[in-house]
Structures are given as C-alpha cells and as structure tokens.
Amino acid sequence: MPVATSRSTDVTLPEGPFPHVALTAELRFETALPYGVCLAFPSRGPGGGTIEWYFGRELLDEGRRAPVGDGDVLVEPGPDGRVLVTLSPHDGRAVVSIPAEAVAAFLADSFALVPAGTESDHLDLDDVLARLLA
C-alpha cells in the first residue's frame, strides 16, 4: 500500500482578481508516484470538487532557488518568502503563491519517505499502469 504525506497551506493568486485573498491548497506526495507531487485546490465551479495539478517533485524543489520548468508548469522563487508556481493549461494561466516554509516542510517530509535518487526503487509500474488505464 502506498505511503503518502500532505500539507495544507494558505496560498494566494497574485495575478487573479483578488490577489490578497487566501485559499487553502494542499501539497500531496505518494510513494507509489515517487517522481511527482500534486497541488490541489477546492473548485469554485459548479459541482465543487478539487482541481489537481501533478508535476515533478524535483521541479518544485529546484524552483525554490531558481526559475525552472517549461510547458504547463514553471516554479520560481517569489517575493517575501514565497514560491510561485505558474500553471498554464491550454485555456489560461494561473500563478499560485505558496509560503516557502510550507514548500520546504512538505519536501522534507517527501524526501524522508523517498530520498532523492531512490525514486526508481519505489516505482510500482503495475500500479502506475493501472492508474493510467483507470
């Protein structure tokens, strides 16, 4: 059974219409998906639910110190002890500002479960295939 860690934190959307209004997001990590992390938000749209973005754990780690990424996700250090995650789906763009200390604590928890460089030891290809085909 996969082991997981998560951390809830208040984030802001500095380029949104209400840049100083905080909303709760969750950073998640599962040992069954050792290369990735999930950033999840409550949906404000009809039906509720959550919006989940999956991207590389290494991208989040490196992005705390210098801008990294291309395509759908860019991570970079932000002002005032924040980490900025830019999400660019096909129909828009959102910048999420996360407290750097929350990102660092979350990553420390994830690296305690799966140390850097040992990800392939934790990869269960049967589980990954089952998730992809579900």
Image (cartoon, rainbow, N blue to C red):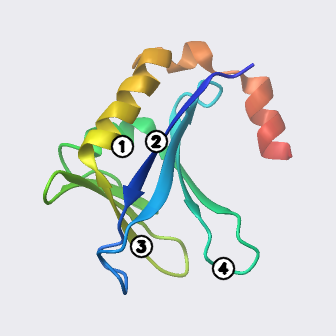
Distance from label 1 to label 4 (Cα)?
27 Å
Disc number for residue 94? 3
- In which quarter of the view is residue 34 placed? top right
- Helix, strand or loop under label 2: strand
Q: Quadrant of residue 32?
A: top right
25 over 130 or under it: above or below:
below
Q: Tell whether label 2 touches label 1 (CB within 8 Å).
A: yes
Comes first in the chain, label 1 or label 3: 1
Q: Nearer the viewer, mark 4 or mark 3?
A: 4
Q: Position of residue 18 (x, y in %)?
A: 35, 83
Where 71 sits versus 63, above or below?
below
In this view, the residue farthest toward the left is 80
Which amino acid does the dot numbered 1 rest on?
Leu
Q: Are marks 1 and 3 in contact (CB under 8 Å)?
A: no
Q: Residues within 10 Å of mark 3 (few under 14, many from 20)?
A: some
Q: Residue at x 36, y 74 (%)?
A: 21
Q: Which residue is mark 2?
A: 56
Q: Which residue sits at x=33%, y=42%?
A: 102
Q: Which residue is mark 4?
A: 45
- Going from the N terminus, do you reach mark 1 or mark 4 first? 4
Quick one: label 3 or label 2, which is nearer the N terminus? 2
In front: label 2 or label 4: 4
